[in-house]
Image: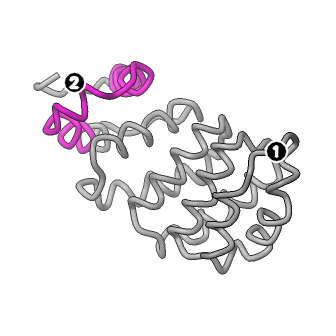
């Protein structure tokens, strides 16, 4: 956990040279990291626009394997980091989607929006049941909904249209 926080706090030097040692140590221990640490690491990498495809594939593989051990919020956070970094891992997102379907109320408006945007960018389509669960949460928190960026709202609307889903409160 300390190593992940060091990587997250490291300077964004050109070419990531300042982060390289911390990141490499974290990645070497990736399977042993706790879910929240995996989330912190992926957000750090996304924030610093980490482009190494092998790193993202490794993280996606570990998250897919740890899906049942991680909290739903942690899984959604990792998916959000992948979308911020413009990386797609359909296998990981499918595994996360299955887990979210089992516990949809454990996410808030922002988490659902980030996850749906991740699915949109990965060209995966959520089923109507998942969209209903997301809409139920998102449409009950109107203050958060008003603060969402247009890309999040458009991802939700496009997913709804392609699934033939329409929530009565929309």
Counting other residues with Cα less than 10 Å from the Cα at mark 1, is it few (<14), some (14-19), or many (20 or more)?
Answer: few
Give residue 13's mark. Answer: 1
Which residue is under mark 2?
166
Q: Position of residue 114 (x, y in %)?
A: 43, 39
Q: Position of residue 63 (x, y in %)?
A: 60, 64
Q: Answer whether residue 149 is magenta in the image.
A: yes
For the point 18% across and 40% down, which residue is it?
A: 136
Of the 4 image quadrants, the one containing the C terminus is top left
* Mark 2–mark 1 distance (CA, rounded to whole Å): 46 Å
What stretch of residues is rendered in magenta? 132-161
Determine the secondary structure under disc 2: loop
For the point 58% across and 37% down, which residue is it?
A: 84
Q: Earlier in the sequence, mark 2 or mark 1?
A: 1
Q: Out of 77 and 127, give the one closest to the viewer.
A: 77
Determine the secondary structure under disc 1: loop
Of the 4 image quadrants, the one containing the N terminus is bottom right
Asked if marks 2 and 1 touch (Cβ < 8 Å), the reply is no
Q: Answer whether residue 8 is magenta in the image.
A: no
Please state if 56 lies on the left or on the right of 14 as rendered. left
Q: Where is residue 15 in the image (x, y as percent from the top left)?
A: 88, 42
For the point 45% across and 52% down, which residue is it?
A: 76
> Which quadrant of the view contains residue 59?
bottom right
Name the mark nearer the viewer: 2 or 1: 1
Main SS, magenta residues: helix
Counting other residues with Cα less than 10 Å from the Cα at mark 2, is it few (<14), some (14-19), or many (20 or more)?
Answer: some
> Which quadrant of the view contains residue 78?
bottom right
> Which quadrant of the view contains residue 66?
bottom right
């Amino acid at each position: 956990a300390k190593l992940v926080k060091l990587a997250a706090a490291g300077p964004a030097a050109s070419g990531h040279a300042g982060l390289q040692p911390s990141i490499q140590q974290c990645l070497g221990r990736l399977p042993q990291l706790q879910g929240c640490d995996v989330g912190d690491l992926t957000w750090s990498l996304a924030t610093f626009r980490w482009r190494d495809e092998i790193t993202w594939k490794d993280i996606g593989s570990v998250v897919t394997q740890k899906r049942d051990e991680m909290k739903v919020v942690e899984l959604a956070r990792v998916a959000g980091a992948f979308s911020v970094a413009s990386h797609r891992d359909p296998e990981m997102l499918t595994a996360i989607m299955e887990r979210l379907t089992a516990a949809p109320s454990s996410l808030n408006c922002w988490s659902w929006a980030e996850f749906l945007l991740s699915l949109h960018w990965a060209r995966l389509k959520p089923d109507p049941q998942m969209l209903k669960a997301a809409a139920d949460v998102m449409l009950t928190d109107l203050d958060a909904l008003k603060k969402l960026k247009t890309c999040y709202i458009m991802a939700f609307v496009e997913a709804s249209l392609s699934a033939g889903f329409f929530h009565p409160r929309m």
